[in-house]
Image: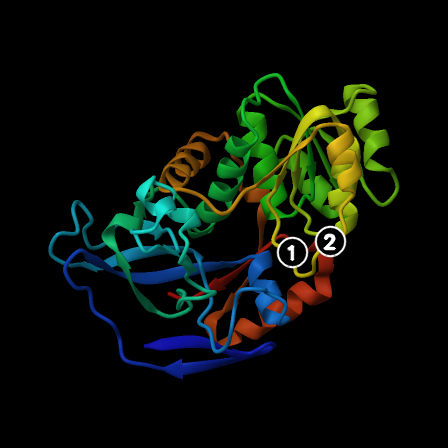
Amino acid sequence: MRQAVMTSPGRIELREVPSPSAGAGEVLLRVRVIGVCGSDVHVWHGRHPYTSYPVVQGHEFCATVEAAGEGAGDLRAGMKVTALPQVACGRCRPCRRGDEHICEALKVEGFQAPGVAQELFVAPSERVVPLPESFSDEQGALVEPAAVGVHAAARAGELDGRRVLVMGAGPIGNLTAQAARAAGADVLVGDLSDRRLEAARACGIERTFNAGSRPAPEAVGEAFGVSGADAAFECAGSAASVNAAIASLAKGGRMVVVAVFGERPPTDLGLVQDRELTLAGSLMYRKADYTRAVEMIAGGAIATDPLVGPHFALADYASAYRFIEESGPEAMKVFIDVG
């Protein structure tokens, strides 16, 4: 079978490797489509803090079940599925309390463990999530980033009736904003790209502003009043965005850090202390977040069509990254066709 290997930053080789098979409790998946995410871009540039080379990328994907091993439950050949990419130890304190996503020995497929950039991939059956047959391949691949948004929204606590700022309108920021809106929040989204803000509005996020032309506290004041936002989500991964979000929060507010940072940002902790703000991290998701993301996409609470960008062949993987580089913030979700 074909497998794409990133041998070093900016270099991907297509190799022929033996096809795997499913053992007991495992499922053999035929990968159809992979989504390229911001964390993958960090790996391409050699700036992901927790990835070494060579690495097989790919963790946002849609697949069909090729074969199911003994003890794989109700999973059957031909089913449309996706799967969680976390590899947890099952023994540490976070794992024992049900927080496998922050396992002390966590590995993530596509970063510290081989990902799905190959024609066939074996996954433990407990990490496989069935999808509605009505789902497009793009919707299946977007379940993973949607689950990031669902989990992040939950990390902010009760959002019904709350005033929420989301910094960053890329796919993760967009999906986080949609998850917060579905939880009852009044949402304002800021970004430097008018194209991404347009996509947010197409997804039903009515309040947006360009953070390059309007300071976030000013936009928040106009939208929510001078006291500021009750909660903020940092989805851009930049120092300017972090500090803009902090400056826009009401006293006693809460900020959830969702983005992966290629560089450590200087942060105004003086405001955090003075306003008694709460900073919370949000790492990936639990399986329940995946299930909820599937339900929200299927039910229309999360829109995906405005996020869908161009497709590239597996053999042309590197061109997807070059397209993202050339397009800059104008690019939304780029896909790799495998099957």
Picture coordinates of residue 215, whole percent (x, y) = 86, 37
Q: Residue at x 39, y 64 (%)?
A: 116
Q: Residue at x 18, y 51 (%)?
A: 76
Choose mark 1 or mark 2, whichever is in front. Answer: 2
Q: Residue at x 75, y 41 (%)?
A: 269
Residue 33 appears left or right of 170: left
Residue 300 appears left or right of 269: left
Picture coordinates of residue 262, whole percent (x, y) = 66, 61
Picture coordinates of residue 169, whole percent (x, y) = 68, 43
Q: Which quarter of the figure has residue 26?
A: bottom left
Alpha carbon separation for disc pair 1 and 2: 8 Å
Task: Quickly name the residue at label 1.
Answer: 261
Task: Quickly name the residue at label 2.
Answer: 265
Say if 24 sits above or below 73 in the image.
below
Residue 174 appears left or right of 54: right
Please, what is the three-letter code of the amino acid marked with disc 1? Phe
Can you say which quadrant of the picture contains the C terminus? bottom left
Can you say which quadrant of the picture contains the N terminus? bottom left
Say if 220 sits above or below 262 in the image.
above
State the SS at label 1. loop
